[in-house]
Amino acid sequence: MRLIFIFIDGVGLGEQEAGNPFVYTETPGLARLLDGKRLTSKAVNHESLKASLFSLDATLGVDGLPQSATGQASIFTGVNAAAFLGRHLRGFPNNSLRQLIAENSLFKQLKQIGYRVTFANAYRPPFFELLRRGLPGCRYSCSTLTTYYGGLPFYSLEDIKSGRALYMDITNEVLQRMQFDVPLLTPEQGAQQLLNISRKFDFCLFEYFLSDLAGHLADSNEAGQVVTRLDQFIGSLAEQIDPDQEMVIVTSDHGNLEDVKRRDHNLNRVPLLMIGDEYLRRGRGRHLNDLTDLLPLVKELLAEGGNQKKPIRRICNR
């Protein structure tokens, strides 16, 4: 079993109301996965033949609004980073969280078990000078530090051209506006590229963070465009995977985009969308509570993916 883990920054499960871009924007890709339902709190625990939608607590039992640094560190280490610090931390990890990631990197843990892992995102040229210097300072994302301390290579824009990496906006529009010579992709082509990358590994991580930026703008048009792109990307990926061999996991660190009436994060639970083998995902929601449960879930899925008794259990479940 190969896992494609898509981390989308700043997407919670909002209400079925007009101010939610997952409601006022058409999302046919997600609708196909959720039997016509929208990606809202109302659809939580819905399980179809193709996908299951569960929810996770992003507050981690700590007062205040969930933030990116502690939420992402919790996802990528399996440790409650907010409780570890005694508060939620926005933006980038501080030195304490950096040490936590260095010791507990998701990639480090999976490599120690023997899995082949990769971070599919590509980086622009200035980053590689910082990498040569050992990533000094504190303005690096949790995914970057997780990759760094996991001992993995970082991909460049040349890797995008050769099909070995994907930029964080999926389509390369941001890079083209910055005058970089890279091909423009559709979300569907981006999905195909990510799938091709993932098939060389047991676990593949991809991060998309324009969702959180759009949420902070509180611009309904921008939020709708982000939702459309994500819907096309996820929907296309779901159509292309081999459900007997591949599973897609989509999740986030805190709510934001789903409520365009405000510019800040919120207390909403975040989605855990699982796409793929029904046997491996059905009923998982009963054992999932918060962001720290994601890393154990990944390990369980990778371990159980080769279970030869799967068809027998699937028949019993029906």
Image: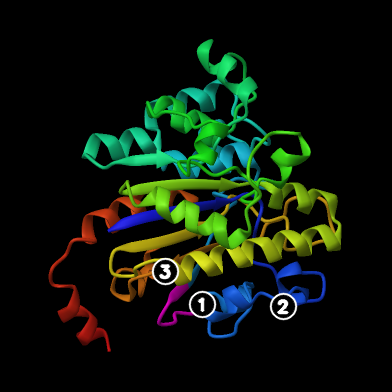
Q: Nearer the viewer, mark 1 or mark 2?
A: 1
- Compared to residue 182, the image places residue 153 above or below, namely above
Magenta-span inclusion, residue 46: yes
Q: Secondary structure at mark 2?
A: loop
The residue beneath circle 2 is: 16
Q: Nearer the viewer, residue 61 or 296?
A: 296
Give yes or no for contact between labels 3 and 1 (Cβ–Cβ under 8 Å): no
Q: Quadrant of the C terminus?
A: bottom left
Left or right relative to 100: residue 277: left
User: Could you tell me residue 35's position as x and y percent?
Assistant: 53, 85
Looking at the picture, tell me which residue is in the foreground, 32 or 69: 32
Q: Earlier in the sequence, mark 1 or mark 2?
A: 2
Residue 270 seen by the camera = no
Residue type at tag 3 = Gly
Mark 3 or mark 1, earlier in chain: 1
- Report the residue at 26% width, 42% height from top: 115
Which residue is painted at 81% across and 57% down in the image? 222
Which residue position holds label 3? Answer: 285
In this view, the residue farthest toward the bottom is: 318
- Most frequent secondary structure within the magenta stretch: loop
Q: How far is mark 3 from mark 1, CA to CA?
A: 17 Å
Which residue is drawn at the image coordinates 75% and 46% (left, top)? 213
Q: Secondary structure at mark 3?
A: helix
Distance from the alpha carbon under mark 2 to that under mark 3: 21 Å
Task: Compare marks 2 and 3 and give the one earlier in the sequence.
Answer: 2
Q: Secondary structure at mark 1?
A: helix
| Region rendered in magenta | 45-52
| Residue shown at the point (51%, 13%) measured from the top left | 132
Q: Amino acid at mark 1?
A: Leu
Residue 94 in percent (x, y) is at 60, 24
Single out the residue that lies furthest toward the left.
Answer: 308
- For label 1, the residue is 33
